[in-house]
């Protein structure tokens, strides 16, 4: 046996002879001259160490030992061809792959639309979406396990994500709004006083936002009465819908339920907080695919800035289920 490696095309050559019944027909199928094809068959036989074909028989036939392996040769050629294609496809994907770390609440609300927009002009770009909390998103970015992160930020918030090695773009807006089941909203309108709530742990992002920007603006004669605590915004939406209490959740996440009437938006009597959807990456980008998507996000941000005034960037707010403010509680200025 020769020290040369076996080649996929040699398997195709063997099968071509079996299918055509002659070297001339097989050479034509393989788009080679008959002499070149005959030399290739000899090379295959030299490599294997046995004659594969009965040249004395017309039309030429496989020898019995070769014929016995014909199906296996066909399967091997097919598997090798698939392997080659999968390796090439994997290489193309790795070159065109972008990993996006998305804050949990965004993953199920605004991020899908952003991914759709990013891929609109780059259908060949493969996006891997990783959902995580804020700190994990930034950690994935800094450890270069993600090419960019999509996270919430309160407008005017301090420089927690600003550094020489980080770039940010505001690519959309949202709002943390108080919502509750209609029955809870009606009870609040009648009684006032105590506010049953779905709370966030103090160490998660929305827990910090609530404590810093919302709780201080709730009227002093209203008492927060947490009924359940969860770090998951999707769970907070469901708990509010189940009548457990009032939850402050991203409007984008609750919008369908508000429009369907299964949740009431209490933003006309309780304070909320504007949010900016921010794209974050390490300065300098991370390859052609990442830079292409960043350019799309940058263009989107420019359109948002020029299309409408800043105050109108938030999602359209549906008319909430109306309820009278509790005694002594005036609707806050939002």
Image: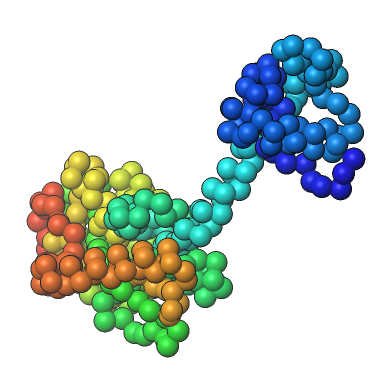
* Above or below 325: residue 321: above
Residue 283 x/y as whole percent: 43, 80
Q: Residue at x 35, y 47 (%)?
A: 238
- Residues 194 and 165: in front is 165
Residue furthest front in the image? 35
Q: Nearer the viewer, residue 187 or 134?
A: 134
Quarter that holds the N terminus: top right
Q: Can the viewer see residue 187 in this picture?
A: no
| Residue 169 percent across, percent down from the top left | 31, 74
Asked whether residue 91 is in view, the answer is yes
Location of residue 6 (image quadrant): top right
Which part of the image, by quadrant, shows the C terminus?
Answer: bottom left
Vertically, is 204 above or below 119? below
Answer with left or right where residue 12 lies relative to residue 68.
Answer: left
Q: Quadrant of residue 33?
A: top right
Single out the residue that lies furthest toward the top.
Answer: 58
Residue ID at (76%, 15%): 61
Is the residue 3 above or below the residue 157 in the image? above
Q: Residue 290: x, y in percent?
A: 42, 66
Residue under the point 41% across and 52% down:
124
Judged from this view, the residue extending furthest toward the bottom is 164
Q: Quadrant of residue 228?
A: bottom left
* Pick the front one: 40 or 150: 40
Residue 249 position within the rendered picture, expressed as x and y whole percent measured from the top left: 31, 59
Q: Is residue 300 above or below residue 255?
A: below
């Amino acid at each position: 046996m020769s020290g040369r490696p076996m080649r996929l095309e040699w398997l195709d050559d063997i099968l071509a002879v079996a299918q055509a019944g002659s070297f001339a027909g097989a050479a034509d199928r393989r788009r080679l001259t008959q002499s070149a094809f005959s030399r290739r068959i000899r090379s295959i036989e030299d490599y294997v160490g046995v004659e594969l074909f009965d040249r004395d028989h017309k039309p030429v036939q496989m020898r019995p030992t070769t014929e016995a392996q014909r199906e296996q040769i066909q399967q091997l050629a097919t598997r090798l061809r698939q392997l080659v294609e999968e390796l090439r496809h994997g290489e193309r994907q790795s070159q065109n792959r972008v990993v996006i770390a998305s804050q949990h609440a965004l993953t199920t609300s605004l991020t899908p639309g952003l991914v759709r927009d990013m891929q609109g002009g780059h259908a060949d770009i493969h996006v891997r979406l990783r959902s995580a909390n804020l700190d994990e998103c930034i950690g994935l970015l800094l450890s270069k396990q993600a090419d960019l992160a999509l996270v919430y930020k309160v407008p005017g918030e301090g420089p927690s994500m600003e550094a020489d090695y980080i770039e940010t773009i505001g690519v959309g807006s949202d709002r943390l709004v108080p919502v509750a089941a209609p029955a809870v909203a009606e009870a609040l309108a009648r009684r006032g006083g105590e506010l049953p709530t779905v709370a966030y742990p103090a160490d998660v992002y929305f827990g910090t936002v609530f404590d810093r920007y919302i709780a201080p603006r709730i009227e002093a004669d209203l008492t927060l009465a947490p009924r359940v605590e969860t770090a998951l915004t999707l769970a907070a939406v469901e708990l509010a819908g189940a009548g457990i209490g009032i939850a402050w959740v991203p409007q984008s996440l609750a919008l369908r339920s508000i429009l369907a009437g299964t949740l009431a938006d209490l933003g006309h009597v309780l304070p909320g907080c504007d949010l900016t959807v921010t794209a974050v990456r390490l300065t300098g980008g991370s390859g052609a695919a990442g830079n292409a998507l960043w350019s799309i996000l940058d263009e989107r941000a420019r359109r948002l800035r020029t299309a409408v005034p800043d105050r109108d960037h938030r999602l359209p707010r549906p008319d909430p289920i109306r309820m009278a403010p509790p005694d002594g509680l005036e609707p806050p200025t939002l």
